[in-house]
Image (spheres, rainbow, N blue to C red):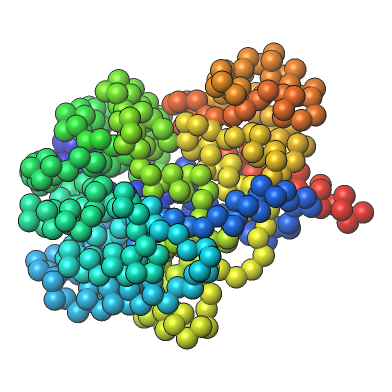
């Protein structure tokens, strides 16, 4: 929308399986050098052996690099109106398909893909005929479920009705309306989406932009609700080092909003969108009933997924594996993959600390929260007791909510009493979740607190084994 009046609507869906960062909007993988847990139950091992049924595809092309962007992209130039025959695009798609074809998959572990996500970059700049080649390569290698959710980020000003219809014919059934430089392009993009009969589509908003006011943010939310997308994602501007914004602005200092203002923006979004019947099912995500993003649930449930393309990171067998972020290095990687010189499923030992912190981080992003009984089965009762004890002050303050199996809120007296029991079955505690919006706003601190508990507990177990 108009920069002087409204917040721009754009696509920056996270967590993307790209480079990890410690923020409430991304997947992280900490304690990379930690030791393995002494006892690792069958449930955890079974979780790590789940066959991936989702794939992320990175299409890195953009007109130019946005001021806040630190993702691996290829800037085509604003004058590039028609990229059907741009050799940079055509060659990249060929390398991408080669990577898919060369990926090693155990025959007994092969399963059709249930979700495919085209991210970027600006995927809508890639001609549908080239997108078709990628989908065909995925179908040949893994198979595609008949009802697979296939999502694509599409920025206003980079597609028309003809392109939209061609993309729909390919089977893409979930669209993401993205970055905008003017209000007219936003309205035109929404009109195209509705004209083409797209049922499942999402708008992403960014808050805490330079010079943004409460009235500007409220108007952006009002216009978004008026457009009636089935899904809305709301993100706070992240100032990354090395970006233009990173060189121009310091977080919390004018012209950026203060932390208090940013918190107010988040609360306003939660209130207005929930009042408009959007379910706040994840820190940054709101959806009408039945329209939650299936692909992103793969990340939030810590399930394995394939990833293909420049800078993307897969998660298979409990291990993350990142591709090179530079085009020439990526091409060399694909050649090595074809020659059997690299294992794209990742090499190395699975560390229980990594798995435990991932599960906590991702679960506490969601309204469902952390499943305490499953967590105990995988990591033991002592770590669960320590986690509950650490969170009691935040239960008292209302930032953390404890629930029983019927998802009934447990009072502080009931929770304190549960600490007397040795197992979670006796405790009756089924879930821990962050409150909305206050707990979500404190998510970095609360998740970091859990990381400290996990670190201390597992170090103690390691020490006991050595002794």
Of residue 185 and residue 111, the one placed in the foreground of this image is 111
Above or below, 42 relative to 309: above
* The residue positioned farthest toward the right in the image shown: 467
Q: Is 381 left or right of 83, judged from the image as shown?
A: right
Does residue 158 appear in this view?
no
In the rendering, at what x and y percent does residue 419 appear? 76, 24
Assign the C terminus to one quadrant of the image.
bottom right
Residue at 66% across / 47% down in the picture?
43
Q: Is residue 230 placed above or below 51 in the rendered structure?
A: above
Q: Residue at x 34, y 69 (%)?
A: 140
Of all residues, the one furthest to the bottom in this rendering is 339
Number of numbered tags placed on the structure image: 0
Which sits in the foreground, 439 or 125?
125
Q: Is residue 263 left or right of residue 221?
A: right
In the rendered structure, the answer to whether residue 81 lies left or right of residue 262 reads left
Q: Position of residue 406 (x, y in %)?
A: 56, 20
Q: Work out whether 392 lies above or below 442.
A: above
Residue 401 in sight from this viewpoint: yes
What residue appears at the point 13 percent right and 71 percent down from the top-left corner?
A: 84
Does 320 appear above or below 335? above
- Taking depth in this image into account, of 236 and 402 the one nearest to the observer is 402
Quarter of the rendering containing residue 159: bottom left
User: Dividing the image into 4 quarters, which one contains the N terminus?
Assistant: top left
Q: Residue at x 7, y 42 (%)?
A: 195
Residue 156, position as x, y percentages in the image? 15, 50
Image spot of residue 455 (x, y percent)? 71, 47
Say which quarter of the image contains residue 277. Answer: top left
């Amino acid at each position: 929308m108009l920069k002087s009046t409204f917040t721009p609507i754009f696509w920056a869906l996270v967590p993307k399986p790209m480079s990890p960062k410690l923020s409430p909007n991304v997947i992280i993988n900490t304690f990379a050098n930690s030791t393995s847990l002494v006892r690792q139950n069958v449930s955890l091992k079974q979780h790590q052996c789940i066959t991936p049924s989702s794939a992320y595809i990175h299409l890195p092309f953009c007109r130019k690099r946005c001021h806040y962007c630190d993702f691996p992209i290829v800037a085509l130039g604003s004058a590039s109106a028609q990229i059907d025959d741009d050799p940079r695009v055509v060659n990249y798609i060929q390398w991408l398909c080669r990577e898919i074809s060369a990926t090693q998959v155990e025959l007994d572990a092969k399963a059709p893909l249930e979700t495919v996500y085209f991210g970027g970059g600006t995927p809508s700049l890639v001609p549908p005929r080239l997108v078709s080649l990628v989908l065909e390569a995925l179908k040949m290698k893994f198979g595609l479920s008949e009802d697979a959710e296939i999502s694509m980020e599409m920025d206003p000003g980079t597609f028309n009705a003809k392109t939209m219809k061609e993309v729909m014919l390919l089977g893409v059934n979930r669209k993401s309306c993205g970055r905008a430089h003017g209000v007219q392009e936003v309205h035109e993009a929404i009109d195209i989406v509705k004209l083409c009969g797209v049922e499942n589509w999402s708008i992403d908003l960014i808050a805490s932009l330079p010079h943004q006011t409460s009235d500007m943010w409220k108007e952006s939310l009002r216009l978004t609700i008026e457009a009636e997308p089935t899904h809305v994602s709301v993100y706070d501007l992240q100032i990354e080092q090395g970006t233009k914004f990173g060189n121009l602005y310091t977080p919390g200092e004018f012209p950026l909003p203060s932390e208090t203002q940013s918190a107010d923006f988040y609360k306003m979004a939660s209130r207005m969108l929930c009042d408009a019947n959007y379910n706040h099912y994840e820190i940054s995500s709101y959806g009408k009933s039945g329209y939650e993003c299936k692909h992103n649930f793969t990340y939030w449930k810590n399930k394995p997924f394939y990833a293909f393309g420049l800078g993307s990171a897969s998660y298979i067998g409990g291990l993350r594996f990142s591709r090179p972020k530079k085009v020439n290095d990526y091409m060399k990687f694909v050649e090595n993959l074809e020659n059997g010189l690299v294992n794209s499923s990742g090499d190395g030992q699975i560390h229980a600390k990594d798995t435990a912190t991932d599960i906590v981080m991702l679960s506490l992003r969601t309204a469902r929260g952390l499943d305490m009984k499953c967590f105990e089965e995988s990591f033991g009762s002592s770590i669960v007791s320590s986690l509950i004890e650490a969170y009691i002050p935040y239960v008292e303050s209302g930032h953390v909510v404890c629930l029983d199996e019927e998802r009934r809120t447990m009072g502080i007296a009931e929770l304190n009493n549960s600490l007397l029991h040795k197992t979670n079955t006796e405790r009756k505690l089924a879930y821990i979740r962050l409150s909305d919006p206050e707990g979500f706003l404190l998510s970095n601190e609360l998740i970091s607190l859990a990381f400290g508990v996990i670190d201390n507990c597992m170090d103690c177990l390691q020490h006991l084994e050595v002794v």
